Image (tube, rainbow, N blue to C red):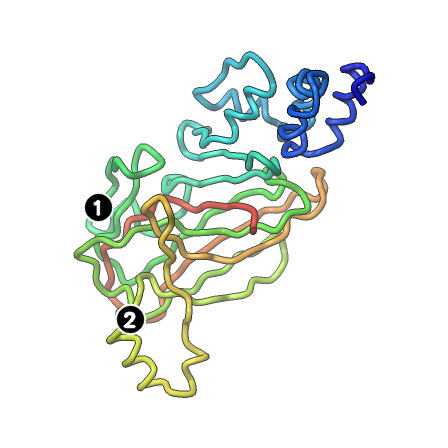
Amino acid sequence: MKMLPEECVANILSFTTPADTFSSASVSPVFRLAGDSDFVWEKFLPSGYSRLISTSTHRNFSSKKELYRCLCESVLIDNGRKIFKIEKLSGKITYVLSARDLSITWSDQRHYWSWSNRSDSRFSEAVQLIMTDWLEITGKIQTGALSPNTSYGAYLLMKVTERAYGLDLVPAETWVKVGNGGKKIHTSYLSCLDDKKQLMKRLFYGHREQRMAKKEPRVRGDGWMEIELGEFETGREGEEHDKEVVMSLTEVKGYQLKGGIVIDGIEVRPKR
């Protein structure tokens, strides 16, 4: 293998994965040089990466490998309304849609929602629910913007404030719909139930508890919480296979006043 020319090694690496290419650098100097070539990393970059870079603040790169490494970090695109990221070892695509990129019922009404800059937000601003009895949050993305033949999950990114109320009384409905396909509705509370409320739920519902919502927000490593809205498959690559994905969380049936959640966006990432 040491006698193979660099161009031949680069061609071989282009048919592997980013993880293989990163690890091959220790094989020999030829593999290291071939693994740095633009030819190899062009194959690993997502299609349409030029348009993505043109809408971000990062535009100058010395090599395609440097560009790939940059995209492994969170890159703001579309005037700061979205975050684009790829997984380092697989090259799989992740998007985060900001709160401004979502459809939130009455979010333009100040007595219902409050927009503000937050130091802990991924974006320039997030939105906090003041009070409503009609919670409806929807986000959309195209399968063509994501990695093909991949299982994805959609997650609402949120926090619960100290003065939150009405979030653990009626579960919200969550669902994801792809194209003209159907949607499977799940339920989730908007905050974690304390021990006392967990006990009351078991006593009240008894054997019917399996019918009640089991999901609650999960604490993330970045200090935020997430609620899984659903999952979906992207299918094959190509414009003819490009479909709209609609992701939603609603709580409109209980007419329960609620407030005190902060919405940062919806993350669409490959399932582990």
Q: Residue at x 26, y 35 (%)?
A: 119
Q: Say few, some or many: other residues with alpha carbon within 10 Å of mark 1 (under 14 / 14 to 19 / 20 or more).
A: few
Estimate how packed mark 2 is, as few (under 14), some (14 to 19) or many (20 or more) residues with alpha carbons within 10 Å.
Answer: some
Place of residue 175 in the rendered image (x, y in percent of width and height, measured from the top left): 50, 60
Q: Quadrant of residue 8?
A: top right
Q: Residue 190: image x %, image y %?
A: 33, 61
Residue 123 is situated, as x and y percent measured from the top left of the image, at 35, 34
In this view, 68 is above or below 30? below
Q: Residue at x 71, y 38 (%)?
A: 238
**Disc 1 residue type (three-letter):** Arg
CA separation in Å, label 1 and label 2:
24 Å
Please indicate whether residue 107 sits to the left or right of residue 19 in the image: left
Seen in the picture, residue 229 relative to 75 is either above or below; the reply is: below
**219 sits to left or right of 142:** left
Residue 98: quadrant of the picture: top left
Q: Relative to residue 214, is residue 96 depicted above or below?
A: above
Q: Residue at x 30, y 47 (%)?
A: 107
Q: Can you tell which mark lies on residue 119?
A: none
Amino acid found under the numbered disc labelled 2 = Leu
Residue nearer the viewer, 88 or 27:
27
Residue annotated with mark 1: 110
Q: Which residue is nearer to you in this view: 166 or 272?
A: 272
Q: Quadrant of the N terminus?
A: top right
Q: Secondary structure at mark 1?
A: loop
In this picture, is 131 found above or below 92? below
> Residue at coordinates 50% horizontally, 25% vertically from top-left?
70
The label shown at residue 169 is 2
Q: Position of residue 78 (x, y in %)?
A: 46, 29
Looking at the picture, tell me which residue is in the foreground, 124 or 58: 58
Q: Is residue 17 left or right of residue 216?
A: right
